[in-house]
Amino acid sequence: MESFEQSSTSVPEQRKSTFGDTAIWMRGLYMLLLALAFGVAQTLLCITAIAQFLWLLFSGAPNGQLTRFGSSLARWVAETARFLTLASEVKPFPWAPWPPAE
């Protein structure tokens, strides 16, 4: 029982607080702005998909401009998702060039 009391009264190793780190707060601001833009991009992607389907339905072939726009928008969404999940430190558009279509 004595060893338990000793371990419970020892001072745990303290972690450094990051609440005052402006770089982390700036990252949070970027993440907030990009999360809002991500929602807009999802809506644009859905509209593009519907428009592309209708174009295909009536013309029999996909629209090249919508294909290129959808491809570049999908790349931006992927870059943004990587930044939002901290898998990348590279900020996507508008802090970097718009990604080209594949």
Image: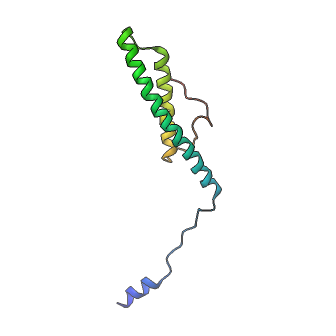
Point out the residue furthest to the bottom here. Answer: 2
Q: Is residue 93 above or below residue 26?
A: above
Whole-percent x, y for residue 54 in the image: 38, 16
Q: Is residue 52 above or below residue 78?
A: above
Q: Residue at x 39, y 11 (%)?
A: 61
Q: Residue at x 54, y 72 (%)?
A: 14
Quarter of the image holding residue 34?
top right
Whole-percent x, y for residue 83 in the image: 52, 43
Q: Residue at x 53, y 44 (%)?
A: 88
The answer, for residue 35, to whether it is visible in the render is yes
Whole-percent x, y for residue 38 in the image: 50, 38
Left or right: 30 as drawn, with respect to 43: right
Whole-percent x, y for residue 30 in the image: 59, 45
88 or 65: nearer the eye? 65
Point out the residue furthest to the top here. Answer: 59
Q: How many marks?
A: 0
Q: Residue at x 65, y 56 (%)?
A: 22
Query: Could you tell me which quadrant the N terminus lies in?
Result: bottom left
32 or 3: nearer the eye? 32
